[in-house]
Image (spheres, rainbow, N blue to C red):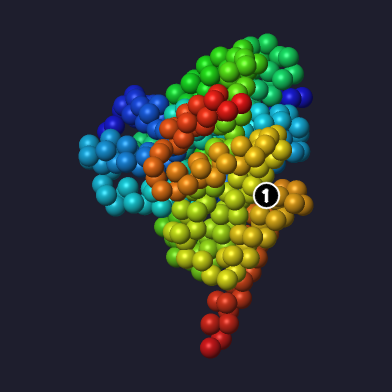
Amino acid sequence: MVSLWKIFWIFAKIGAFTIGGGIPMIVAIKKELVERKWLNDEDFVDIITLAQTAPGLFAVNIAILTGHRLRGTKGSVTATVASCLPPFLIILLVAMFFTSFKDNEYVIKAFKGIRPVVVALIGIPMIDMLKATKMRWWSWIIVISSMLLVCFLSVSPIYILICVIVMAAFVSWYNNRKEAEK
Amino acid sequence: MIFVELFLTFFLIGMFTIGGGYAMLSLIQNEVVSVHGWITDAMFTDIVAISQMTPGPIGINSATYIGYEVLSQQGASEFMCVLGSFTATFAVVLPSFIIVLMLCKVYEKWKDHYLFKGIMSGLKPATLGLIGTAALSLATPENFIDWKSFVICILAFIALYFKKVGPFGIIGLGALVGLLVY
């Protein structure tokens, strides 16, 4: 059985060195867990799929699921805390440090250049996902109308997600019934 | 009380984070900037930039940072700021922790159910829309101060799209350009 300390150590390491979100983390986890034979390939694919389906952050979901597979709920808690701890501590340091430098002339100038870059940085994953998703006519309606509603009418994204869940459930229920009648 | 509000806000954000950290950004922005007015759009953008440069999932990083900043804006002591960080981070992880553990148990049985599949196919484009929203709603006058900002954004977009630079590199370049032109 894998010890909780080992789980903690590995996920802390993964949390501390993952820059750029979930995808690089998949590579790190595969290396640490599958190559040590703690997980087999099938477990690994299941965990990735479930982590993407469930709400929450991909990286954290992977920690929750892997911890669960290895040591049940205890393992889950350990892996989750371990993967959140390094980023938490690093950000705390940055926040303390940055507050005292925020009004520095050069810092202000640098951030004037950084802000437009951030907008581009967020735009890119959307393009990548658009390419990876099979888009139908109604997918475009959902994409565009959710953008318009949030940006221009300040509707909370939460309401949009609830509406989409209810509508999608209804449509698939209806389609299923129609097929059953045939 | 501010801690209760922080907890509830980030709990809600964590619960409705579907599609990962980037989709979460529009939720965070809506709640933290628009609804509560805890921080400004420019500050939010800076936090996103810093979250992207530091290791760890962007959702954890920004929750930690915003928790700190909300308290700091109100003139709280360093210790209270750290407590704010902890509250926001804990609250953002908690819902997915509960939901993922429950999903673990029913996923095998449900993953091929037509309702589940239908809901997922509706949520995918909604997630895309929310990521687009995060990018669009950061294109504010605060972040785009003049024509140079637009040029920086477009150049960054092109560089990222053709995978010439990573997220870390592009933020560094943005800072450099900001120092040179402003």
Q: Would you name the residue on which mark 1 appears?
A: A157
Packing grade of label 1 (10 A; few <14, some 14-19, many >=20) is many
Q: Can I make out residue B30 in this image?
A: yes
Q: Quadrant of the N terminus of chain A?
A: top left
User: Looking at the rendering, which quadrant does residue A4 occupy?
Assistant: top left
Q: Can I make out residue B87 in this image?
A: no
Position in image of residue A171 (x %, y %): 61, 71
User: Looking at the rendering, which quadrant does residue A71 occupy?
Assistant: top left
Name the residue located 45 percent from the left edge and 59 percent from the top edge.
A131
Seen in the picture, residue B49 relative to A178 is either above or below; the reply is above
Residue furthest to the bottom: A182
Name the residue located 53 percent from the left edge and 19 percent from the top edge.
A94
The chain containing the residue under callout 1 comes to A
Which residue type does callout 1 highlight? Pro
- In this rendered view, identify the residue nearer to me: B44 or B165: B165
Name the residue located 56 percent from the left edge and 31 percent from the top edge.
A114
Please indicate whether residue B72 sits to the left or right of residue B166 in the image.
right
Position in image of residue B18 (x %, y %): 56, 49
Position in image of residue B32 (x %, y %): 70, 35
Please indicate whether residue A173 sits to the left or right of residue A84 in the image.
right
Name the residue located 22 percent from the left edge and 37 percent from the top edge.
A36
